[in-house]
Image (tube, grey):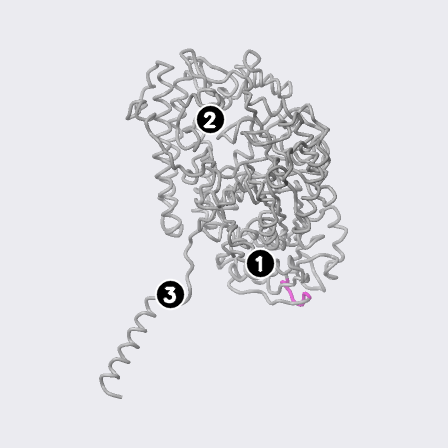
């Protein structure tokens, strides 16, 4: 070889060595949030040795698709957490085995059958016990689905640093139907979505099944969600055509091993739009035959189809009232079609007609309570947590407790339509917990909304909870890293409505960021106050519906006019020279009368109503003296500023975690918190500038005046804000 050639070869070898020294030894995945709470990063070494000793061998007897998914998850999780995967075996043969299965499928678990009897199809046991004279950890259930849920719980114990000795965990879900509602359109636009396009790539289905669909199923199964409504409640009838049913069937095939059923939003006028009928009257025999045939077709295509979600006679959607029929008539027609297949109807109680009522908050109660006990057994009436529309704070919906003969399904919003979209950090579990713990008092003290939802108050077997999803095509699924916590919290509370929001936050932070107390404690602390901060700088003291028209972005308490009064802000706050607030007491709309007498008495009396609901139920003079000793005006200004100050404090806390949280996620959260502070200040300033035109009072000492006049804030326009309905 010529000398020049040798020099070139030597130079290439040196360059390769130099590059090797710079590059990491193996592939490094960026912490971009895609793995959600299923990161499976190595545990602290002082715990790892003990965990490895208790997971030396893995036995998953079931060869079903769900059993295979369970085995793959445990191998993936244990390899990531412990740095090594346990040996796979057909039977437990050494100390430290993890045995997962059912008594029917694994003789080693047969003795546990009596202990599992009361846990149903989805419950499980996680127990430390000897098998064949050797120490083992058992995850046992009556079904493979229950075993899958137990396996995720077992991995969660390791992720959060819990001890694995002397385990004796017994769990079963307290609600039967735990679903996400996707407000996704067939063109991939997501109504009230702030995380990109819909993850359902309808055009390329059924041929292309994006791997994200499996990731979606894993994440949902890990928190006990067992159903998904694929399409928007403001739906197109095309969803029920053969083309789209085939696409939905492809998704159902991906989700099935993870215990997730597919549901569809059904457009009430579908018999006209795709069926060629001249009516959709639910009492018309031809219409009933059409829906029965359609249900048969759906189940031929998707044998384990869950059922229909329906939005009817609300916001212009067609429904049974178009034909002089009731909500029960409409729901029962669909229930009749689904019943032979085991399907259910989730009929939304979010209704308000074009004939404006005296108070929109009263309409759902008025339309549904007279039909209590007339809905078919496979109908769930799906009720939002509050009577208006997912506001930062609402009192619990008066329907809870008012329909004892009808199972009511809770509907929460996970996507933050009214709480800052994806850029504001607002941990929603305290909102969910507040609603679930509210006491309806219909059976005396302790008759909580949670007991209505889980069926225990009235003995209902069909129960459920729905969450309007915040998931999109963004790499981190939800647009913001902290919005993942709301998806996680919804699933955990749907499984058990009595869990505490702080405990859920602590779990999520440990699984998502770090188990280091120097990270966990401050992050949980800032999360726990974040929703209250949003209430303060957006809608303090019971104010509500003050956002921009249509897109719902930013403050606009001045919105008036348009097609309906109850789509305006002024309809709800009713500020004038005398005071502010919507009088729903006996002297006003009397909406308080829809609650049980003790609750109505509390809410209806200015002296006893909780201050957080003050302006929801009362029109209050500006000089009314608050518990703090301040006047109402001064307290209102104080609350606005307090919300901004809390966001400022969150920024300081998060800045102090630099180096303790991976750089990529830390940078995005920091940027979003900066946006949140700017927008919180905007909410504070615009709201004060507007309401001061009515109060005519000076700002309290030390409170800065808005930097612009009211006309400036009113001039701001946002025609392309994301998430608006089409």
Relative vertical location of residue 56 with respect to residue 332 in this rendering, above or below: below
Q: Earlier in the sequence, mark 2 or mark 1?
A: 1
Task: Select label 3 or label 2 by which is in front.
Answer: 2
When asked about the image quadrant of residue 548, the answer is top left
Label 3 belongs to which residue?
24
Q: Earlier in the sequence, mark 3 or mark 2?
A: 3
Main secondary structure along the magenta-highlighted residues: loop
Please, what secondary structure does the residue beneath circle 3 have? loop
Q: Residue furthest left?
A: 4
Query: Residue 261 colored magenta?
Result: no
Label 2 belongs to which residue?
545
Residue 402 position within the rendered picture, expressed as x and y whole percent measured from the top left: 66, 25
- Determine whether label 2 and label 1 are within 8 Å by CB: no
Query: Residue 92 colored magenta?
Result: yes
Q: Earlier in the sequence, mark 3 or mark 1?
A: 3
Relative vertical location of residue 296 with respect to residue 381 in this rendering, above or below: below
Please, what secondary structure does the residue beneath circle 2 have? loop
Relative vertical location of residue 552 with respect to residue 523 in this rendering, above or below: above
When asked about the image quadrant of residue 6, the answer is bottom left
Q: CA distance from mark 3 to mark 2?
A: 52 Å
Taking 687 as reference, is 508 left or right? right
Q: Nearer the viewer, residue 411 or 681?
A: 411
Q: Residue furthest bottom?
A: 1
What is the span of residues highlighted in magenta in the rendered image? 91-97
Label 1 belongs to which residue?
73
Q: In the image, what residue occupies the spot 55% across and 65% down?
A: 85
Q: In the image, what residue occupies the spot 65% across and 51% down?
A: 301
């Amino acid at each position: 070889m010529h000398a020049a050639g040798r020099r070139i070869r030597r130079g290439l070898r040196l360059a390769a060595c130099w590059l090797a020294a710079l590059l990491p030894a193996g592939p490094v995945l960026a912490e971009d949030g895609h793995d959600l709470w299923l990161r499976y990063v190595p545990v602290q070494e002082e715990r790892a040795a003990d965990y490895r000793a208790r997971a030396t061998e893995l036995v998953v007897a079931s060869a079903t698709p769900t059993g295979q998914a369970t085995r793959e998850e445990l191998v993936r999780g244990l390899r990531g957490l412990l740095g090594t995967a346990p040996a796979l075996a057909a039977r437990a043969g050494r100390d430290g085995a993890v045995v997962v299965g059912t008594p029917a499928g694994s003789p080693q678990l047969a003795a546990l059958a009596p202990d599992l009897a009361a846990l149903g199809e989805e419950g499980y046991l996680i127990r430390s016990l000897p098998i064949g004279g050797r120490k083992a950890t058992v995850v046992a259930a009556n079904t493979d689905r229950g075993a899958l849920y137990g396996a995720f719980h077992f991995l969660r114990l390791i992720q959060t640093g819990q001890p694995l000795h002397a385990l004796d965990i017994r769990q079963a879900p307290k609600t039967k139907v735990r679903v996400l509602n996707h407000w996704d359109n067939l063109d991939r636009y997501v109504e009230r979505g702030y995380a990109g396009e819909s993850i359902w790539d309808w055009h390329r289905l059924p041929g292309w099944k994006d791997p994200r669909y499996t990731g979606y199923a894993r994440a949902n199964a890990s928190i006990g969600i067992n159903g998904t409504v694929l399409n928007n409640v403001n739906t197109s009838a095309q969803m029920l055509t053969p083309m789209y049913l085939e696409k939905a069937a492809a998704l159902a095939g991906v989700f099935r091993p993870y215990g997730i059923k597919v549901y569809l939003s059904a457009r009430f006028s579908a018999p006209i739009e795709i069926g060629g009928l001249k009516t959709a009257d639910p009492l018309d025999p031809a219409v009933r035959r059409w829906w029965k045939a359609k249900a048969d077709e759906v189940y031929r295509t998707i044998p384990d189809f869950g059922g229909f979600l329906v939005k009817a006679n609300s916001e212009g959607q067609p429904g049974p009232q178009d034909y002089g029929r009731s909500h029960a008539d409409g729901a029962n027609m669909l229930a009749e079609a689904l019943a032979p297949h085991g399907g259910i109807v989730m009929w939304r109680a979010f209704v308000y007609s074009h004939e404006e009522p005296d108070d929109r908050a009263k309409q759902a109660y008025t339309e549904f309570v007279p039909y209590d006990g007339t809905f078919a057994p496979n109908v769930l009436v799906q009720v939002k947590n509050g009577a208006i529309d997912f506001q930062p704070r609402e009192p619990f919906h008066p329907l809870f407790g008012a329909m004892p003969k009808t199972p009511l399904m809770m509907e929460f919003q996970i996507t933050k339509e009214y709480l800052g979209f994806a850029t504001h950090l607002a941990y929603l579990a305290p909102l969910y917990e507040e609603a679930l713990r509210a006491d309806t008092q219909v059976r005396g003290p302790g008759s909580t909304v949670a007991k209505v939802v889980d069926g225990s108050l009235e003995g209902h077997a069909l129960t459920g909870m729905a969450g309007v999803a915040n998931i999109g095509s963004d790499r981190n699924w939800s647009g913001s890293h902290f919005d993942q916590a709301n998806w996680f919290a919804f699933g955990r509370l749907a499984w058990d409505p009595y869990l505490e929001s702080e405990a859920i936050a602590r779990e999520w932070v440990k699984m998502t960021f770090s188990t280091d107390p120097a990270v966990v404690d401050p992050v949980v602390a800032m999360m726990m106050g974040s929703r209250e901060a949003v209430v303060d700088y957006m809608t303090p003291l019971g104010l509500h519906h003050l956002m921009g028209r249509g897109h719902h972005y930013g403050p606009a308490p001045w919105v008036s006019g348009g097609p309906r009064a109850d789509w305006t802000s002024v309809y709800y706050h009713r500020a004038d020279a005398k005071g502010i607030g919507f009088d729903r007491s006996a002297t006003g709309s009397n909406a308080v009368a829809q609650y049980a007498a003790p609750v109505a008495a509390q809410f209806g009396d200015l002296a006893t109503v909780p201050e957080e609901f003050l302006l929801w139920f009362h029109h209050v003079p500006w000089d009314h003296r608050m518990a703090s000793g301040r006047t109402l005006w001064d307290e209102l200004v104080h609350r606005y500023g307090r919300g901004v100050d809390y966001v400022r404090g969150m920024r300081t806390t998060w800045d102090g975690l630099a180096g303790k949280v991976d750089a990529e996620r830390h940078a995005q959260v920091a940027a979003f918190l900066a946006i949140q502070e700017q927008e919180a200040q905007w909410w504070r300033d615009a709201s004060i500038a507007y309401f001061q035109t009515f109060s005519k009072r000076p700002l309290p000492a030390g409170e800065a005046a808005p930097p612009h006049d009211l006309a400036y804030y009113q001039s701001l326009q946002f025609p392309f804000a994301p998430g608006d309905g089409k």
